[in-house]
Amino acid sequence: MSMSRHFIVMYCVTFFCLTAVKAEPVPYPQDRPALRLYLADGRQQSFTLHQLQRFPQSTIRLRDATGKEQVWVGVSLPWLLQSMDEETHDRPVYTRSLNHYSVVIPAVDIQRYQPLIAYQRDGQFLSIRDHGPLYLIYPLDDYPELHQQVFYNRSIWQLSEIHVE
């Protein structure tokens, strides 16, 4: 077989194989730490997705840009903080993502809007590729005042750390 024919055959085989394989997002391992919580008193706690699922679940329903409803399931941020005996009524939390994006969530937001630490959207666990494994999300459709850039910025995907200040 000539070199050019060999190249063409290899190119076609490679192209066919790549287009035939549908790459599905890989789910985040249920037993690997997904969230680290650093409390103001110096205590630290790590949570796996499996552990987070054992906590009381909360749900937020949002419409996407096309108007389709999405159902987000996870743990309420105020509930998680209170479960650690952490008084957060007047303390903001500093959040950080896997890609090192960080944002401060004011204490008033935590109490008033009860953001959700979501691990599922429409019954599917969030892969890292799909903004997971955790996504701190506000109930944007329940409060019209949340439709501002500042609140979109506070909805942090790939959430990996929470620091109580």
Image: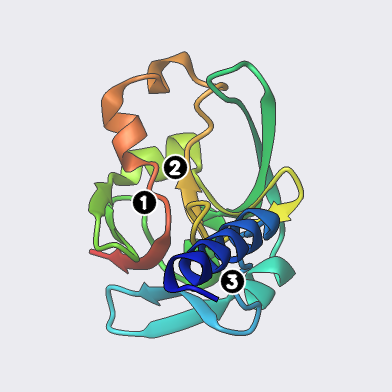
Labels 1 & 2 near each other (Cβ < 8 A) = yes
The residue indicated by pointer 1 is 89
Relative vertical location of residue 109 with respect to residue 42 in this rendering, above or below = above
Name the amino acid type tagged 1: His
Name the amino acid type tagged 2: Gln
Neighbours of disc 1 within 10 Å: few (<14), some (14-19), many (20+)? few
Neighbours of disc 2 within 10 Å: few (<14), some (14-19), many (20+)? some
Q: Residue at x 46, y 14 (%)?
A: 144
Q: Nearer the viewer, mark 1 or mark 3?
A: 3
Q: Position of residue 119 (x, y in %)?
A: 61, 57
Per the model, the C-alpha gap separating discs 1 and 3 is 32 Å
Q: Is residue 116 left or right of residue 72?
A: left
Q: Which residue is at the far right? A: 123
Q: Quadrant of the N terminus?
A: bottom right
Q: Position of residue 47 (x, y in %)?
A: 54, 78
Q: Mark 1: which secondary structure? A: loop
The residue indicated by pointer 3 is 28
Q: Position of residue 142 (x, y in %)?
A: 57, 22
Q: Position of residue 92 (x, y in %)?
A: 27, 52
The residue indicated by pointer 2 is 111
Per the model, the C-alpha gap separating discs 1 and 2 is 7 Å
- Please tell me which of labels 1 and 3 falls first in the chain: 3
Q: Residue at x 63, y 84 (%)?
A: 31
- Please tell me which of labels 2 and 3 falls first in the chain: 3
Residue 98 shows in this picture = yes
Q: Nearer the viewer, mark 2 or mark 3?
A: 3
